[in-house]
Image (cartoon, grey):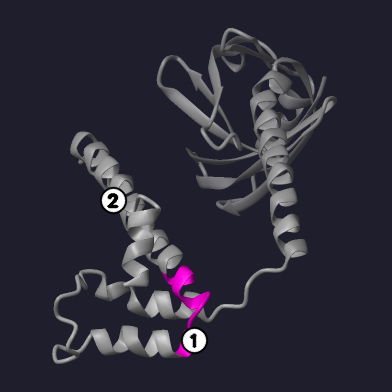
Amino acid sequence: MIHESVHVQQGHTWDVLFLQLIKAVFWFNPAIYLLEKQLREIHEFQADRAVTTNYSTIAYSRLLVKQLSKDCGLQFMNNFNQFQTKKRIMMMNKTKSKSNQKMRFFLGLPLLVLMVGLFSCDLAMSQTDLMGVWKGTEFQFEQTEGPDMTAMIEGGRALHEGGRLILNEDGNFEIFAGQGDMNGSGTWKLSEDEDLLILTMNGDEETKYSIVSLSDEELVTKHEVEFDSPMGKLAGIITLTYIR
């Protein structure tokens, strides 16, 4: 009776009715059903705490277990939350947090918000940091398949080390690497997780460069290459280093 009177005194019925109105509108959102479950559990925990303030936790826990039996003699009581009985008993027997523990928890919340904010700002600045003119400096090729084609690899190195990559603010880019077909232009963007630089040439030819490192003065990328040559298939990983 004390347990049920707490529900009345604290207006838990109004909480439930208000939530039912919300659920009638947002019935399609699974979060509302999780919220309803959590709210009902909190109501039960609050009522149980009021009972155990004046009565034995062990005796009250036994009463809750006894209520699960059909012949307990308390059939007039509403027991629709039987699935919560185990959680309620565990909650009643938990050791209450000390004041200093609660203080550490609440002090940690602003720190968590600050860390998330700083991380978000860092991600938001990544695309801005990439904009500008980058000059090729180092070229490395790790061959994974195919014959030895040192001459072709050295030719790629010369083009990169004398070339430039220009990433414009409007999402367009230009590549200058020698003459003729080696030069190009198109659009650029970052992937959603912001670890890939995606260059699109000729409207549909897309190349993804993994960003190994990025600073104010240096950009290092990696990407896989694979193509057929007169001597057979050639494949490997190219690491490109740029400076501003």
Is residue 212 at least partly visible in the picture? no
For the residue marked with disc 2, what is the amino acid? Thr
Chain-order first, disc 2 or disc 1: 2
Q: Is residue 173 above or below residue 155?
A: above
Location of the C terminus by quadrant is top right
Compared across the picture, whether 86 is left or right of 90 comes to left
Residue 105 versus residue 118: which sits nearer the camera? 105
Mark number for residue 56? 1
Residue 50 counted in the magenta span: yes
Q: Residues within 10 Å of mark 1 (few under 14, many from 20)?
A: few
Tell me where the magenta segment starts and ends, as one range: 48-58
Residue 44 point in image, percent of width and height? 38, 65
- At horizontal 70% and vertical 51% (from top left) the residue drawn is 106
Q: Mark 2 highlights which residue?
A: 13
Say what amino acid the circle numbered 1 marks. Answer: Ser
Can you give x and y, in whole percent of width and height, for residue 73 in the image? Answer: 17, 88
Residue 197 % position (x, y): 59, 30
Q: Secondary structure at mark 1?
A: loop
Q: Residues within 10 Å of mark 2 (few under 14, many from 20)?
A: few
Work out whether residue 114 or residue 225 is closer to the camera in this orientation and state it: 114
| For residue 24, above or below residue 180 | below
x 66%, y 69%: residue = 97
Is 93 on the left or on the right of 76, as rendered? Answer: right
Residue 127, picture quadrant: top right
**Secondary structure category for the residue under label 2:** helix
Which disc, if any, is residue 67? none
| Residue 235, image x, y percentages | 55, 47
Q: Looking at the image, which is closer to me, 132 or 158?
A: 132
- Give yes or no for residue 8 being in the magenta stretch: no
Left or right of residue 243: residue 76: left
Relative to 28, is 146 on the left or the right? right
